[in-house]
Amino acid sequence: MKILEASYVKSAPRVEDFPENRPEFVFCGRSNVGKSSFINMLVQRKGLAKTSSKPGKTQLLNLFSINKSIYFVDVPGYGYANVSKDKLAEFAKVVNGYFKNSKNLKCAFLLVDARHEPTGQDVEMLEYFRYYNIPYVIIATKVDTIGTTKVYSHIKVIKNKLKLTDSDIIIKASNVKGLGRDETLEIIDKYLGDEMSD
Ligand code: GTP
Ligand code: MG
């Protein structure tokens, strides 16, 4: 897919507030993992989704129009110790509400930090997708921070912890180096293609 248009639509607490019914792709994962940066990398617009070195930047469902035909949904992150319990509970409500009520979700991109073993909450998120048959793809971010010779062993740790099988897709990504862009856009195409042949 070529990105011809990318614009911010709105921040909304609920999926019912989205202005149109369009195929949706959501980017989720731990706070600070690089969800908003990943969206910017995909659309090649640095400031489109707001990013921050401080966790908890994204607080609502942030909606981006892509090619005037689909939505990217940037959601608050989970599980960061430096974000207050109340805030985290609020974030969880927004994200859970989205997954429960979205009728147009085509694929969830679950971002994990390539440097660390996935957390219990990453595992829970994935189990949720499996239970509800939500298509998902794992994005291992920030691979620029680990030496190229170590990337393979880090990916293996992620695969083990998340119990990924050969049919699961894991993409090595770096928002700094623009890595993982083509693969992700190809996957989006695949889900849009599936829809057209329905
Ligand atoms: P929340 O909105 O708080 O949940 O965070 P987020 O997941 O949207 O993360 P965000 O995109 O705001 O990035 C968090 C920090 O990680 C920022 O300081 C980014 O510059 C940095 N970062 C994001 N992606 C990468 C990457 O691929 N490599 C490196 N080295 N840093 C990255
Ligand atoms: Mg964010």
Image: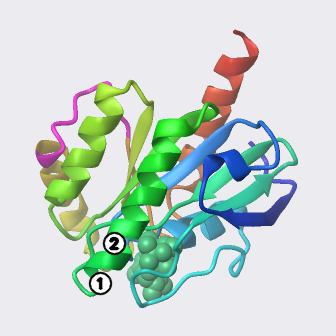
Whether label 1 lies within 8 Å of ligand 1 gets the answer no
Q: How many marks?
A: 2
Q: Residues within 10 Å of mark 1 (few under 14, many from 20)?
A: few
Q: CA distance from mark 2 to mark 1?
A: 6 Å
- Residue 107 in picture, x, y percent from top left: 52, 37
CB within 8 Å, label 2 to label 1: yes
Where 123 sits versus 31, above or below?
above
Q: Examine the image and state in which quarter residue 106 appears.
A: top right
- Residue 12 in picture, x, y percent from top left: 66, 62
Query: Is residue 69 a member of the stretch shown in magenta?
Result: no
Residue pointed to by mark 1? 84
- Residue 30 in picture, x, y percent from top left: 33, 66
Residue pointed to by mark 2? 88
Q: Magenta region: which residues?
A: 161-169
Where, quadrant-wise, is the C terminus in this rendering? top right
> At 16% across and 49% down in the image, what residue appears?
156
Where, quadrant-wise, is the N terminus in this rendering? top right
Where 103 sits versus 116, above or below?
above
Secondary structure beneath dot 2 equals helix
Left or right: residue 6 compared with residue 165: right
Q: Residues within 10 Å of mark 2 (few under 14, many from 20)?
A: many
Where 93 sits versus 106, above or below?
below
Secondary structure beneath dot 1 equals loop
Which is the main secondary structure of the residues drawn in magenta?
loop
